[in-house]
């Protein structure tokens, strides 16, 4: 995050002789250098139920406090590792109905700093210490970036579902007196009205006009309880995916059923490769199902090198404490995996469940301000369902405003 090359040494003489910016990260100071007293966490192997006491440093939450001699009052490296590695997700916890780690279990949620990119804030403050100790050293400036993710779990709400699924859905709507949906379904099927999920042409035009660099994630799994897309064998499916891929990056939304099945994950990746005739290296998991560290091992096995699932569906904020990409570290095997994690800070679930649009707008703009303040990467997950210029015109305009001409 500091955009500098780093070299480490365990030799005190080599450290003292080095001319240039340096940090003594150990248990004891040597000779007036910038000193951060080390917590035990990074010198241990495996997982233990480490005690975490959250305090504040200049109004910023922090933990793993150190001695008074330390220039930084907490071990910024151990605390960053704890959040970035998702250390707490290795500890015993009760998963939700979809097998996910609940946001409510997290340290950030419990201590009310989930909506702050604390790791980026800590790094910025560490940079100030380095600049004070080494005023002649010039740091590169990070550049704020913003890009949206567009999830496509279902291409159409009513079209191309087949006779049996259409009849069944209509009968179900009638049973629950969802007469509006029944009427809309017939309007769409008769060609009187556009399918409410079919917003792809409008999105392509908006992205081209405003220089928005979105990434689309298409579901390529078979029909199941939680995966209800139209058949991938439908010619309309292939045509649509290929047309979007002509203008934007297209990658894979791993199906619900692929969550613990690496062979199915590989099959779905292969399907998309055959559709678009180009490599597929990015992945997001359906329902944001992320099982640490197993999901990242599966990604590695299936030859993905970028993950876009690091975040919570139901809560805005920074699951790993950061708005910056980072490489995943598997604590169980004590190795860095070849998967870059690109975290998001809000998802379409927030937009679907929020009582009113003004609440959504305030939340998204506050998150954007937090990311901009540290020159991070602002990423929000939308879907073809919520990005509808007719039914959600205010959200459509906010989307264009937040992501236009940012990259």
Image: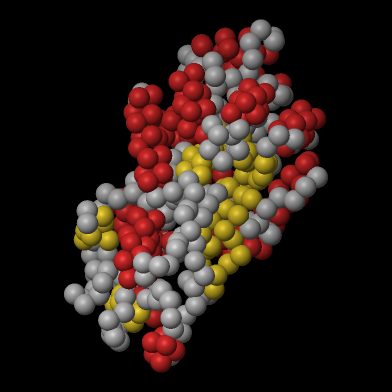
Q: Quadrant of residue 261?
A: bottom right
Q: Quadrant of residue 108?
A: bottom left
Q: Is 181 located above or below residue 153 in the figure?
A: above
Count of labels shown? 0
Q: How is the image coloured?
A: secondary structure
Residue 93 shows in this picture: no
Q: Is residue 395 left or right of residue 227?
A: left
Please give the name of the residue rendered at 52% of the width and 34% of the height, measured from the top-left corner: 403
Question: For this rendering, which residue is in front, 173 or 313?
Answer: 313
Q: What percent of the width, then of the height, locates residue 143?
A: 49, 49
Q: Is 268 located above or below residue 149 in the figure?
A: below
Q: Residue furthest top?
A: 192
Question: For this rendering, which residue is in front, 51 or 387?
Answer: 387
Please give the name of the residue rendered at 71% of the width and 50% of the height, measured from the top-left corner: 280
Q: Is 137 located above or below residue 17 in the figure?
A: above
Q: What percent of the width, then of the height, locates residue 149?
A: 56, 39
Q: Is 400 located above or below residue 288 in the figure?
A: above
Question: For this rendering, which residue is in front, 81 or 24?
Answer: 24
Q: Is residue 15 left or right of residue 277?
A: left
Q: Quadrant of the C terminus?
A: top right
Q: What percent of the width, then of the height, locates residue 202?
A: 63, 22
Q: Residue furthest left?
A: 68
Please give the name of the residue rendered at 31% of the width and 75% of the height, measured from the top-left corner: 34
Please give the name of the residue rendered at 38% of the width and 24% of the height, measured from the top-left corner: 357
Question: For this rendering, which residue is in front, 144 or 132?
Answer: 132
Q: Is residue 22 left or right of residue 221?
A: left
Q: What percent of the width, then of the height, locates residue 339?
A: 59, 61
Residue 282 shows in this picture: yes
């Amino acid at each position: 995050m500091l955009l500098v090359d780093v070299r480490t040494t365990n030799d005190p003489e080599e450290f003292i002789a080095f001319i240039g910016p340096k940090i003594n990260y150990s248990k004891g100071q040597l000779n007036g250098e910038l000193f951060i007293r080390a917590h035990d966490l990074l010198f241990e192997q495996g997982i233990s139920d480490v005690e975490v006491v959250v305090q504040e440093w200049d109004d910023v939450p922090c933990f793993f406090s150190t001695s008074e001699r330390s220039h930084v009052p907490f071990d910024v490296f151990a605390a960053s590792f704890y959040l970035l590695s998702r250390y707490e997700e290795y500890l015993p916890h009760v998963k939700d109905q979809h097998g996910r780690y609940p946001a409510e279990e997290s340290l950030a949620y419990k201590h009310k700093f989930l909506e702050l990119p604390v790791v980026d804030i800590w790094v910025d403050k560490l940079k100030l210490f380095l600049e004070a100790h080494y005023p002649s050293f010039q740091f590169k400036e990070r550049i704020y970036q913003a890009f949206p993710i567009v999830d496509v779990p279902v291409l159409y709400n009513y079209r191309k579902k087949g006779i049996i699924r259409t009849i069944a859905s209509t009968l179900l709507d009638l049973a629950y007196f969802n007469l509006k949906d029944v009427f809309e379904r017939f309007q769409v099927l008769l060609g009187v009205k556009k399918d409410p999920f079919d917003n792809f042409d409008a999105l392509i035009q908006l992205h081209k006009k405003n220089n928005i660099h979105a990434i689309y994630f298409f579901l390529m799994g078979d029909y199941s309880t939680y995966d209800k897309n139209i058949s991938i064998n439908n010619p309309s499916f292939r045509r649509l995916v290929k047309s979007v891929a002509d203008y934007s990056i297209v990658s894979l939304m791993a199906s619900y059923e692929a969550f613990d099945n690496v062979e199915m994950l590989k099959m779905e990746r292969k399907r998309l490769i055959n559709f678009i005739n180009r490599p597929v290296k990015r992945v997001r998991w359906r329902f944001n199902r992320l099982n640490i560290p197993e999901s990242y091992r599966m990604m590695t096995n299936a030859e993905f090198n970028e993950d876009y699932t690091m975040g919570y569906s139901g809560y805005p904020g920074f699951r790993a404490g950061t708005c910056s990409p980072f490489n995943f570290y598997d604590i169980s095997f004590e190795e860095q995996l070849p998967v870059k994690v690109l975290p998001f800070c809000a998802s379409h679930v927030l937009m679907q469940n929020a009582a009113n649009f003004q609440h959504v707008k305030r939340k998204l703009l506050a998150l954007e301000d937090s990311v901009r303040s540290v020159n991070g990467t602002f990423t929000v997950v939308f879907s073809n369902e919520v990005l509808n210029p007719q039914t959600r015109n205010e959200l459509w305009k906010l989307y264009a405003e937040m992501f236009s001409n940012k990259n």
